[in-house]
Image (cartoon, rainbow, N blue to C red):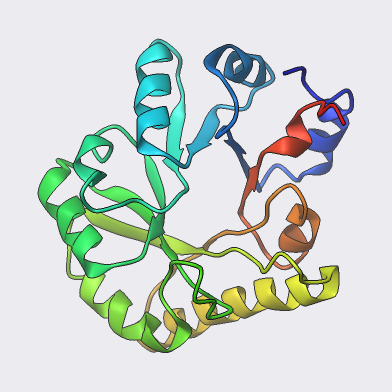
């Protein structure tokens, strides 16, 4: 794929305090190198097999690897020693595997099912406090904040409300539990502007980075 013609303009629009993670699910390693040359060094993968292949092919590059998809517990051991950030911590079982497999703490976002959709993974709001208390007991699970996805059919205003709900949840948990969580992984190509407006510190961008043929 070719880079989007206006990619530099798009990237310059995003404030320096917002981390850009390139979602590379459909991108091969040569195209990932194009992004790397533009200064994007954070790459996010959704699938274990694809991640492992790309990790090996790009071992010489100074890449910060993010796993942004649902991580099945039966495959977690294959990637946990290789990634730098996990965006989809959604179960105590996965947290316990991290605790066992890692030799150093792993930065983790708790995935929150902010809209309580049955088709999506994540911790529901009502269970977030209890879940946090449990994972905070683990030395290798370093919670940095929360991650979410909006509903596809939502309007821009509705998405802003959903993003604001996640920010409010983080502030509430900080107050209740005496924490200083400050990172929000929210916003993709179609809604990153709304996410940034509501406090996103990390955006996961895919197709907006590329010149897509219709």
| Residue 101 placement: quadrant | top left
Q: Nearer the viewer, residue 140 or 67?
A: 67
Percent position of residue 139, x then y: 17, 58
Tally of numbered discs: 0
Q: Residue at x 47, y 42 (%)?
A: 46
Q: Is residue 63 above or below residue 76?
A: above
State the quadrant of the C terminus: top right
Percent position of residue 37, x then y: 65, 14
Q: Residue at x 67, y 76 (%)?
A: 162
Q: Is residue 157 above or below residue 60?
A: below
Q: Residue at x 53, y 16 (%)?
A: 29
State the quadrant of the N terminus: top right
Going by the image, does 29 lie left or right of 9?
left
Q: Is residue 65 above or below residue 183?
A: above
Q: Nearer the viewer, residue 81 or 78?
A: 78
Q: Nearer the viewer, residue 186 or 122?
A: 122
Residue, far left: 100
Q: Residue at x 70, y 42 (%)?
A: 16
Percent position of residue 49, x then y: 36, 31
Percent position of residue 211, x then y: 82, 26
| Residue 179 placement: quadrant | bottom left
Q: Is residue 190 above or below residue 84?
A: below
Q: Nearer the viewer, residue 92 or 200?
A: 92
């Amino acid at each position: 794929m070719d880079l989007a013609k206006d990619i530099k303009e798009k990237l310059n629009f995003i404030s320096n305090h917002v981390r850009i993670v390139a979602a590379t699910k459909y991108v091969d390693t040569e195209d990932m190198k194009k992004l790397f040359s533009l200064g994007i060094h954070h790459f996010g993968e959704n699938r274990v097999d694809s991640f492992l292949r790309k990790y090996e092919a790009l071992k010489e590059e100074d890449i910060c690897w993010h796993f942004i998809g649902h991580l099945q517990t039966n495959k977690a051991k294959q990637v946990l020693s290789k990634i730098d950030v996990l965006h989809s911590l959604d179960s105590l079982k996965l947290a316990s595997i991290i605790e066992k497999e890692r030799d150093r703490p792993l930065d983790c976002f708790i995935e929150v099912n902010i809209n309580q959709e049955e088709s999506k993974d994540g911790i529901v709001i009502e269970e977030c406090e209890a879940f946090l208390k449990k994972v905070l007991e683990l030395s290798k699970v370093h919670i940095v904040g929360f991650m979410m996805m909006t509903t596809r059919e939502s309007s821009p205003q509705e998405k802003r409300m959903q993003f604001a709900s996640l920010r409010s949840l983080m502030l509430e948990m900080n107050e209740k539990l005496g924490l200083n969580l400050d990172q929000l992984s929210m916003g993709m190509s179609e809604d990153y502007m709304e996410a940034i407006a509501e406090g996103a510190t990390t955006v996961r961008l895919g197709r907006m980075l590329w010149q897509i043929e219709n």
